[in-house]
Amino acid sequence: MRYAAWLIAILAMLLYATGQKNNQQENWKCPEVRNVSCACDLPHTLRCTGGKSTFETVAKALRSLSGTTSVSLLDCTVQNVAALPARMLEGVSLHGLVVSSGEIKSVSESAFIGLASPLQALGLPNNQLERVPSAALAILNGLERLDLSHNRLHTIHNNSFKGSPNLTFLDLSNNSIHYISQDAFVNLPFLKVLRLQNNMLSSASTSHLQGLRSLLELDLSSNLLVGQLGPNTLPRLPHLQILSLAHNQLSSVRRGSFAGLEAIISLSLNHNQIDVLEDHGFRAATTLTQLDLANNRIVAVSSASLSHLSKLKTLDLSHNFLRSLTSDLIAPLKSIQDLKLDDNDISIIADGALNSATYITALSLSDNPLNCDCSLLYFASWLSNHSSVYTASDTAVCATPPTLENGLLKDLPISKLVCGGEDNVPPPEGPLAMLQSYSSMKISLRSYQFDGSRISLGWLVTAPVVSYYCKALILYEHVDNHEVLLDSKPVRCNSSQLPDAKSLTLSLVASDLQPTHFYRYCLVLVDSFTEDSDEAAMVVGCSENISLISKTNQVQHTTNFLPNTNIHNITTSFISPSSLFAAVHVILQSSHSDPACTITLSVYSLTKPLAQHRLNCTTPWTTVTELPIEKSYQVCASIGNKFPKDDEETMICTTVDSPKTDWFVSLFNAKSYAFLFSATFTAILFLCMLLVYRTACKTCKKPNNGNILQTHQCFLPVPPIENGSQRPSRSSRTDRRVYSH
């Protein structure tokens, strides 16, 4: 397909509407051009492909055409042509011309001299022009449309279009333009469409697009616009209606960004890095009817962000990070008809959120983690009363609770949209409690670590027969007395491949989580010992709500320590058979703790102390190393400097089984591993040497038929015996062998 096919089609329609008679169009025939490959796919349009002589041959043929074979639009693709020659189409009457070769680097100043009629449209796409051919264009006083896309232009100067004052359409896309002089377009008072996508323009250059007082459409997508979209990004363009700033690196929309764009009706800001819509940022864009903000980083939209867009009909916020749909977003949009919210993090539709959307005809919510509990009763009722809204019912899919996962909200009875009690039971365990009745397996979180970037979760799995494989790790955030589903990550593991099936450690990246926010972690396993379906054998275990605080970020304060501080519990996990991680959970009467507050932690085996550690109340965790292999350990902690056994009033203890209790495992203790390896290697080496020795001996001593010794690598041949009736004595045979050896 030719790069300028769209230009030919538009020009053809324009010409039909401005002067061609119907009977001439019906009787028009495609002209014959010899020695050049030509074809017609539209009336009065000729496409030709050839070499250096194409222009001379085509010009000769076109000069002799009559009315029924006249050509208004000529599209030439030539090969091995690096420059357009002078008077290339002299005497030819054309309204539109397109020339491309992929090799044209220059255009003669007199290339278009001699045309029999004024040229209205010129296309030079898909070439290698490094500058605008200003001198050649100055001859075309009637030129209205110019296409210089897909070239190598890098700079637009003040005189680039000085001789083309009647241009209404200019395509400079897909070049390498990085600089536009301040008055580059002041000589184009009638320009209505300017395309500058896929260049290297920064905000410093886009601010020079001044003087375009008639401009209706501007495309600046896929450039190098970085940072804030502010009042100085664009000049005043009072008649501009369509603006595209997509595929850039804009980070926010500031107040006053659209000052001077009072007529704008369509704005594309998709595929940027926008995370902030400043309050009243669209104050000057009250005429907007279409706004595309898809594929950005928007987390929330305040009530004042879109407060001036009362005429907006289409809003695309898909592929962002919105967590809820509230009336703050919808209420200002009095005329909204089409709302796209696909692929966000929306789990809640607030009550009354869509009450003001009286004209809405399309609402899309696909790929959102909707929490189908009592908080969605309003939205379920709204859907049932707005069944004519396009795609809304088919895109509202439940993500939680797991029993309703992937179910359409419109198909659920109201009785299914229920919330749990106030007993802090995690959301998955309410609906999934019946699943645990099929299995005796229990899951509990026994250790938690956050180092600032990753979270490590140590799970304890108990059952008469521990046999399972992992299903998923589900993450919830506690927000405004609700638990919002953030993510459900598939997990791959098998108990048969773990050193200790009762102890399972998982980790996840915390880059998307917010410090100090509360999160709940739920692990889903499938009991492979239960002879039922995967769903029936599914087991769920959840943590409490845990605040995301890194031990490296915790700050010690100097408030007074309260004597009634106590220990809530102790969690432990084995890092190796001889290393134990222990964390003490402390309950303080204040939000801060005294730096002098200490905890004494001890590890025992059969009442025999194995290790003692002093911990600060602000960092109450440690790793105990070099433990002897025992069947079980007792970990105790108490407030203060006394050892737990001496302070039973504040003492709390927990018993933990060793990950391996077989005597064989002790062989792999760090102290005996080297000895075991050395002994094994020595034994194997000794056996190999013994085998070689025995083989050599058997070979050397093996007799042959006839009682004649075989020649062997160990001995030289025995000399022949002069007297065949006598054999050498034992002593003489021995002497020869020793000598020969």
Image (spheres, rainbow, N blue to C red):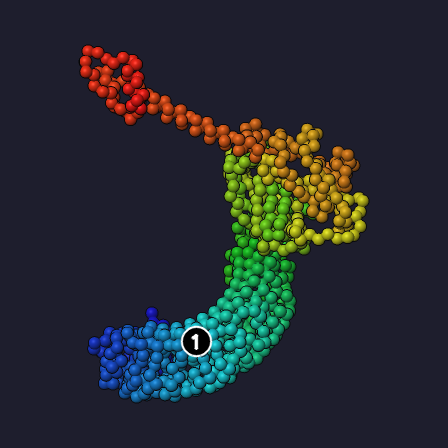
Image position, residue 707 (x, y; %): 24, 15
Image position, residue 637 (x, y; %): 72, 38
Of 308 and 140, the residue lying toward us: 140
Label 1 neighbour load within 10 Å: few <14, some 14-19, many 20+ = some
Residue occupying image coordinates x 49% and y 29% = 679
Residue occupying image coordinates x 53% and y 58% = 343
Of 20 and 552, the residue lying toward us: 552
Q: Is residue 453 above or below residue 576?
A: below
Q: Quadrant of residue 656?
A: top right
Instruction: Pick out the residue farthest to the top.
Output: 725
Q: Is residue 549 left or right of residue 139?
A: right
Image position, residue 54 (x, y; %): 25, 78
Q: Secondary structure at mark 1?
A: loop
Any part of residue 451 in sight: yes
Three-letter residue code for mark 1: His
Q: Is residue 491 left or right of residue 12?
A: right
Which residue matches tag 1?
154
